Image (spheres, rainbow, N blue to C red):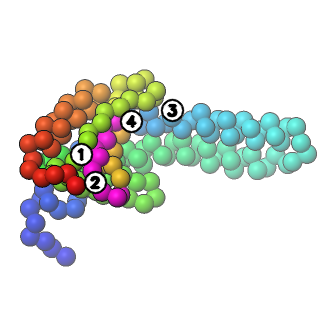
Amino acid sequence: MTTDLPREYALRDPAERVSPRARWMWLTGSLPWWLVLVAGAVVGVTLTDVPWWPVVPLALLAAAYVVVMPLWRYRVHRWEVTRTAVYTQTGWWVRERRIAPMSRIQTVDWSQGVWSRVYGLATVTVTTASAAGALTIVGLEKDRAQALAEQLTQQAQATPGDAT
């Protein structure tokens, strides 16, 4: 199906990627949880008469997740800002593309978690009146995230509309 909409209005792959360092942030953020789970399984098997074989698939699953997930997320997670809207694409198994018109933006937030700070990254969250919730861009370079938050705030303020 073709559309006569200009590119900036079409639901499409956003043009910008998050920082390549986001892969390391996602890896180090998930690794402790998997280590605790596998270590707990090893301790449980050691202290009981449960056979060892279930620990092997769990360890393989953990290794696969920790290696594949950051690469997959980096490949999928994208964002873009035009003069009229903010576009995001996220997903793991289900891919979600969202558009927030500038006239609907209510707040723009900038934040850094523990792992974000370690890697010099940040998150920008764009809140609208949508029941679907905020648009979140995770894994931007800290300076780029701050500049983007300021840019979106200025653009939303300059756009006519009541953000509802």
For marks 4 and 2, give the one nearer the viewer: 2
Q: Which mark is residue 129?
A: 2
Disc 4/disc 1 C-alpha distance (Å) = 27 Å
Q: Amino acid at mark 4?
A: Ala
Could you say where residue 157 lies in the image, as x and y percent from the top left?
A: 13, 41
Q: Is residue 135 visible?
A: yes
Quadrant of residue 43 within the rendered picture: top right
For marks 2 and 3, give the one nearer the viewer: 2
Disc 2/disc 1 C-alpha distance (Å) = 7 Å
- Using residue 160 as the reference point, say whether residue 27 is left or right of it: right
Q: Amino acid at mark 1?
A: Gln
**Is 144 located above or below residue 107 in the figure?**
above
Disc 2/disc 3 C-alpha distance (Å) = 33 Å
> Disc 1 marks which residue?
106
Disc 3/disc 4 C-alpha distance (Å) = 10 Å
Helix, strand or loop at label 2? It is loop
Disc 4/disc 2 C-alpha distance (Å) = 28 Å
Sequence-wise, the earlier of marks 2 and 3 is 3
**Crowd band around label 2 with a 10 angstrom C-alpha radius: few (<14), some (14–19), many (20+):** some
Q: Are circles 2 and 1 on residues that touch, CB within 8 Å?
A: yes
Q: Main secondary structure of the magenta part?
A: strand
> Disc 3 marks which residue?
28
Q: Residue at x 34, y 36 (%)?
A: 123
Quadrant of residue 66 within the rendered picture: top right
- Using residue 86 as the reference point, say whether residue 57 is left or right of it: right
Q: Which stretch appears magenta?
A: 123-132
> Disc 4 marks which residue?
22
Sequence-wise, the earlier of marks 3 and 1 is 3
Helix, strand or loop at label 4? It is helix
